[in-house]
Every structure is written in C-alpha cells, then in structure tokens.
Amino acid sequence: AQSVTQLDSQVPVFEEAPVELRCNYSSSVSVYLFWYVQYPNQGLQLLLKYLSGSTLVKGINGFEAEFNKSQTSFHLRKPSVHISDTAEYFCAVSLQVSTSYGKLTFGQGTILTVHP
Amino acid sequence: EAQVTQNPRYLITVTGKKLTVTCSQNMNHEYMSWYRQDPGLGLRQIYYSMNVEVTDKGDVPEGYKVSRKEKRNFPLILESPSPNQTSLYFCASNPVRGRTDTQYFGPGTRLTVL
C-alpha cells in the first residue's frame, strides 16, 4: 500500500523568506503527486501536480515542487512567502494504475504560518 | 460551471441521531468518494463508488453508509453518529477514463457530534 509522510507538522517563517515543505512517499508502483492548500475555514485547492515529464513543476501563487524519484520525495518550495500564504498544505499521491480510479492518499498536513 | 456541491456545510447534532450529508456533481463523473479530515491525520477515504449501484469501502468506513442510486448523487449516511465522527468531510469526483489524475472536491461539511 502507498503512504505519504509530511516531515514537518508546523513551519513558521517570516514574510519574504524562502520556505520548503517536505513530502516523502512510499509506493510499489508509479504515482502521480499533488500538493493541495487549505486556507483557514476553506476547502481544498490544488496547488500543483506532477504526472510525468519535467521533474520541476510550477504551480499557482509562485509555488513549485520537485519530484525526486530516487529519494521518493516531492518537496514544495516558494522563494519568498507572503502573509497570505498562511495555510495548511497537503501532499498527496494517487497510483498510476487504472484500478485506483484516482483515489488520493494524503499526508498529515503541514501548517505554514507566515509572520510579519 | 463544473462543481461538486455538499449540504449542509455545517451541522451540529447529538449522539445517535441519524443524519445524511448530500453530495452532487454536474460533470457526469463515474467515480465519487468521501473523505474525512482530522487534525494531524490529513484526509482519509471513507467510501467510494465507481458507478451507479457500485460502492466499496475506503480506509475508514466504520460507522458510515453510502448509496449511489443516481450518477450525480452520492450521499453519506451516519445512522448513529458518535463524537469520534466529529470531523470535516469532503466529497470528491473524477472520471474513470481519460483524465483520472485530478479529483474535484466539494466545499466541505463541518460536522460536530455532541
């Protein structure tokens, strides 16, 4: 079975500083990889996804993530954060097999708090 | 507009009082599922359905029921809610052919069981 581990439950950072949110996964088959963001009291929004091709994926709001197959990681980065980036971030995977039907397995979430 | 809707958005109830959370999608998707979100645990799949009258358990099905009588609707039923079912619930859908790589999520239902 697949699993996802987000290595930090909380990440505090000052405004305009860079940030990296770490995500490792485990799976016996190839996976698709996703990052979702949840702003306070809101639903889930897709930030970016890796399906195939270039291992560096760019998403919305200036975020990017890099797929590292050898390390089974998919870390999320932003070079300069804003107060408005304060949210909870979820890493997720789905299996690249037809019988998975897109089921997502999520990590535990990382709360990013941006301080002025 | 393509969307997944859930009702109600917020619900406070008491232990043992049966409730239903509705989910509807307008994209003609075959696959629908329910997730619950709990602090420190992320989102976990409760039940899923691959088409009308085809449902199966996800990772945390205990205490829940579902039905899929129409393609667009996938209600979540709690026949005897308990406090440990206090959670944030999300419905999701996606097609089973072609672009299965992105799930469409509803806005969420925050349930409190007293």
Image (cartoon, coloured by chain):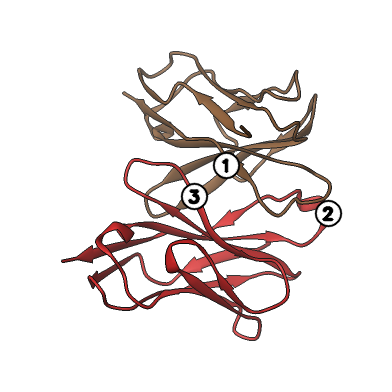
Whole-percent x and y of residue A42?
Answer: 38, 41
Q: Quadrant of the C terminus of chain A?
A: bottom left
Q: Secondary structure at mark 2?
A: helix
Q: CA distance from mark 3 to mark 2?
A: 24 Å
Where is residue A87 shown, x and y percent of the image? 34, 55
* Disc 3 element: strand
Q: Are marks 1 and 2 on the same chain?
A: no
Residue under the image location 76 percent in, 25 percent down? B71
Marks 1 and 2 sit apart, C-alpha to C-alpha, by: 22 Å
Q: Find numbered disc 1 in the image and state the secondary structure of the residue it sits on.
A: loop
Residue B86 place in picture, x, y as percent: 39, 33
Residue A45's label in the rendered image is: 3
Q: CA distance from mark 3 to mark 1?
A: 23 Å
Tag 1 and tag 2, C-beta contact below 8 Å: no
- Tag 1 subunit: B
Q: Which lettered chain is shown in red? A: A
> Measuring 78% from the left and 35% from the top, which residue is drawn there?
B30
Along the viewing direction, whichever of A58 and A23 lies nearer the viewer:
A58
Q: Disc 3: which chain? A: A
Q: Is B70 left or right of A84, judged from the image as shown? A: right
Image coords of residue B45 (percent x, y): 59, 44
Q: Earlier in the sequence, mark 3 or mark 2?
A: 3
| Residue B60: image tag | 1
**The N terminus of chain A is located in which quarter?**
bottom right
The nearer-to-camera label among 3 and 2 is: 3
Amino acid tagged 2: Ser
Residue that appears at 59% across and 32% down: B4
Q: Label 2: which residue?
A: A98
- Residue farthest toward the left in the current orientation of the protein: A116
**In the rendered image, residues at marks 3 and 1 fall on the same chain:** no
